[in-house]
Image (spheres, coloured by chain):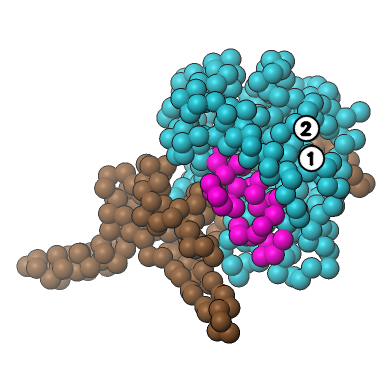
Amino acid sequence: MAVTRRDIVQDAAARDRYIRGVLKLKNEFTGPTTASLGIPGPSRKISTWDLFAVWHHVAMMTMTPPTQNSRNAAHRGPVFFPWHRFMLFQLELNFQRVLPDSTFGLPYWDWAKDGDLPPGQQVTAPIWGAAALGGTGSPVVTGPFVFDPADSKSFRVRIVANVNGQLVQVNRGLRRALGAGVSGLPRKNETSDAVTRKPYDAPPWGVTSDSFRNRAEGWQAPGAPALHNRVHVWVGGDMSPSTSPNDPVFYLNHCNEDRMWERWLTDHGRSYVPAASAPAALAGHRINDAMASLVSAPMRPADVLDMTSVFTYDSLAV
Amino acid sequence: MSSAPDDLNAPTPESIAAYAKRHAVNVRKILTTMHDHPPRETIREVEYHGHHILIGTTYRIEVDGRRVGGEFVVTDNGEVQCHALPNYTFASAVDLVKSMVDIFPEDFADGGHRGHGRSEGDGQRARRAAKNRRAPSSRSTKRAGARRAPKGGRHGGH
């Protein structure tokens, strides 16, 4: 039976299960080490939570094709939505395993609802409360993800990308700089407009495409960084580099993006471009190309176009 | 959804470990080779009044005399982006580097003498060469300098 993904601000039970699952996955070590994955520094075990951050970083550093330096295996191209749906799906399964709760569905954060608040109120919206995701700071000092050096089970950041885009080991608290990088969150009129855009994606299949994917990813002017990108920039701190899945709010952002895609698929049909016959320069983004995973078997965009038997959303009103 | 391996739909600690192990070689290759090449040139090409225009751009960015590595991209509308800040876009490379300083404080600590992986830049080399020319014991200083890696190590070379 399909699980239901709910608004984290509206459903305290979903919120609490999410927080509990984050802390469990953060403290689960299945065997991989920094040495085995070639991350410099002393060899340390990597948690399941951190493996997802490494997976995201690796995808981001995989240029598609390798002759250019913009479009990568998960972003700046058509595979943006399928790749992140695949990642969310794998994370959701792991939450279900460790909680254990087969009915668990990842919650989403309807950030555009907060974006309609005055900027001063956005940083104190309920999602940043001590009972929810905690607040801002370097490190964050409220909420369930506060770093306590004396408590080995407390939330901590262990692997980050540095200014050169290289992975390095750290042992510190989570960082956020809410509202510092950009003045406000995306607004409802932007999300409702984005889901009306057609086609799904278009040449040049990148950050200048006039398409639903590019608008929702947040490259398309006006207002760039917009939508998904703007949320990353607005949260700031550990949401800034390619290891942004370190911050639990990463998945809430992407679950909301996935909700937008589900709305688009519902309204416009479960279609995807580019086709399997598209040129090799689009390898990694075509409908039958494999999306690699660090924690599971691969999937293809074709596999994730209809996942209504796996999960649904409590609302597709964006 | 199409049919798939069972562990795709029901991961276990063992399956996660096995997949991480299976992909380790490729991950190590990606993490190391991404820094084994010089900065890629961004190529912009447009047709205009029957003419083919090509603009190639690379950046040399130094902070406190040390080169900042990584990849920098110019979009068709002239905005500047980089891999280190994958969700950001800037009208100016100066603003981009200011954001880097804000977001990666450890990499710019001690006035550029402790950064992760930043190599000595042309500006710093030029200043060191000028200083050596002025110093009476320049010969020994130069030899030591030639052998010594910059503080903070050299990781990128790109």
Q: Amino acid at mark 1?
A: Glu
**Dot 2: few (<14), some (14–19), or many (≥20) neighbours within 10 Å?**
some
Q: Pinpoint residue A220: horizontal percent, then vertical percent.
A: 59, 52
Q: Is mark 2 in CB contact (under 8 Å) with mark 1? A: yes
Range shown magenta: A202-231
As drawn, A142 above or below A60: above
Q: How many marks?
A: 2
Q: Residue at x 73, y 39 (%)?
A: A260
Q: Quadrant of residue A114?
A: top right
Quadrant of the frame with the N terminus of chain A? top right
Q: Is residue A49 left or right of residue A99?
A: left
Provide the letter of the chain coloured cyan. Answer: A
Q: Mark 1 = which residue?
A: A262
Asked whether the viewer can see residue A179, the reply is yes
Q: Mark 2 = which residue?
A: A316
Which structural element holds mark 1? helix
Q: Pinpoint residue A151: horizontal percent, then vertical percent.
A: 51, 19
Pick the residue in front: A293 or A312. Answer: A312
Q: Residue at x 46, y 21 (%)?
A: A141
Quadrant of the frame with the C terminus of chain A? top right
Q: Are marks 2 and 1 on the same chain?
A: yes
Q: Is residue B130 left or right of residue A59?
A: left
Q: Pinpoint residue A87: horizontal percent, then vertical percent.
A: 72, 42
